[in-house]
Image (cartoon, rainbow, N blue to C red):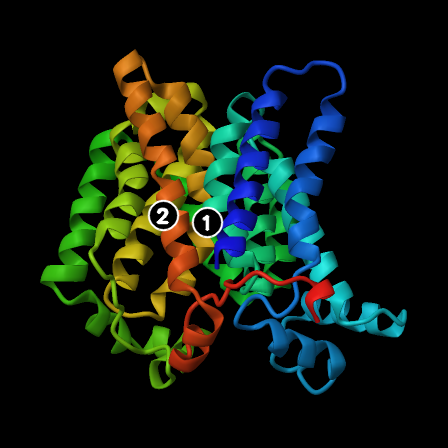
Amino acid sequence: MIETYLTYNTILLCGILISLAIGFVNKGKYTVYLMLFMALFIPAALRYGVGLDFFNYVDIFNRPDYYQDDIEIGFYLIVKTLSILGFGYQSLFVICSALTIFFFILSIDKSSAWASSLVFICTLYLSSYCLLRQILAVAILMYSCRLWIDDKKIKSIIFILLACSMHYSAVLFIPIVIVSSIFKLTTYRALFIMVFITMFVFALHGVDLIFNNKIFLNSKYGSYVSSSFNKETDIGSGIGVIIQMMMPISVAIMSNKILALNKKNNIVIFTTIAFFASYLLATQVYIFGRMADVFSFSLIFAAPLLLKSARSKLSKIAFIGIIILYVPLMQATIKNNNYNNNELSGSGLGIAPYKTVFDK
């Protein structure tokens, strides 16, 4: 396990250091981006037996037509194309890793790339070792959000549809786009919604209300109600939950200042609150963890926005502290996601120990 911790933390350190250089380098910026890409891509592409779903994807690659009705059309076409071209199953992990990291790099804020990279590596990057389709879809959504902020709405919509072709959960982002276009979230509104969500989940037993809703039961998520995913979440000490809540709450508090930077950031505020809601639900029932994953890319936008919107040194230090707290959260993720233990429980990422194709 020591080697696993060293591997993931070396990736994190390299990612942060290279990202820091992005803000200082004018000439040769593309070289720095390439270095960041390679630092994240090589370990992900060379992994073997890492991720609880690894061998499920190997089976999908070997029998794509058998799984055609169970996977989305875009992902099916990737698998089928690689298979027709004669590539082995490892090519699927190579391509998906490359695309996930590529869309992440296209999405990051250049002025505070280190913050985005830190949060990405500590959260979505680790998840991508297991949730191949979903995190690829989330990375594409991340880029579509960047396009939306840059006022490239048509391109943004195209990439949202592309994300939906990789994993159906990307559809959850569509209502966020629509609502954020017609309703502005100021600080008071954002905080009010968060208080209401908290009451809904804990005081009104929101999970039971959702599970009894016909719309939810008839959706693809409805099938999880009668599956092994419908189980109470073990949140341990709750420290991880507190850390995950800090950034969404900070975004709500700073909403007015974030909107002052760019009114298009409204979509980030909405997505962050959607993450807040789904994460609170996930503390009750495991199913909603997948929903939280869809909106978790908002944190990668939120981190640099908090730093930009800070008006005092004290608030900036506080936000840097919140961002750095994702590092111990990453250590806990590695510790709690041992492959053998997760396989026995039927849940988790299964990202430890880290092994490569050379360890076969």
Type of amino acid under label 2: Leu
Camera-near label (2 vs 1) is 2
Q: Which mark is residue 123?
A: 1
**Residue depicted at x 27% and y 69%:** 233
Q: Is residue 248 left or right of residue 182?
A: left
**Which amino acid is tagged 1?**
Thr
- 4 versus 265 height, above or below: below
| Residue under label 2 | 329
Residue at left offset 65%, top offset 61%: 47
Q: Earlier in the sequence, mark 2 or mark 1?
A: 1
Q: Nearer the viewer, residue 107 or 1?
A: 1
Q: Is residue 96 left or right of residue 322?
A: right
Q: Is residue 97 above or below residue 310?
A: below
Asked if disc 2 and disc 1 are in contact, CB closer than 8 Å, the reply is: yes
Query: SS at mark 1?
Result: helix
Residue 354 against residue 182 in the figure, above or below:
below
- Give coordinates of residue 238: x percent, y percent: 21, 54
Q: Quadrant of residue 202?
A: bottom left
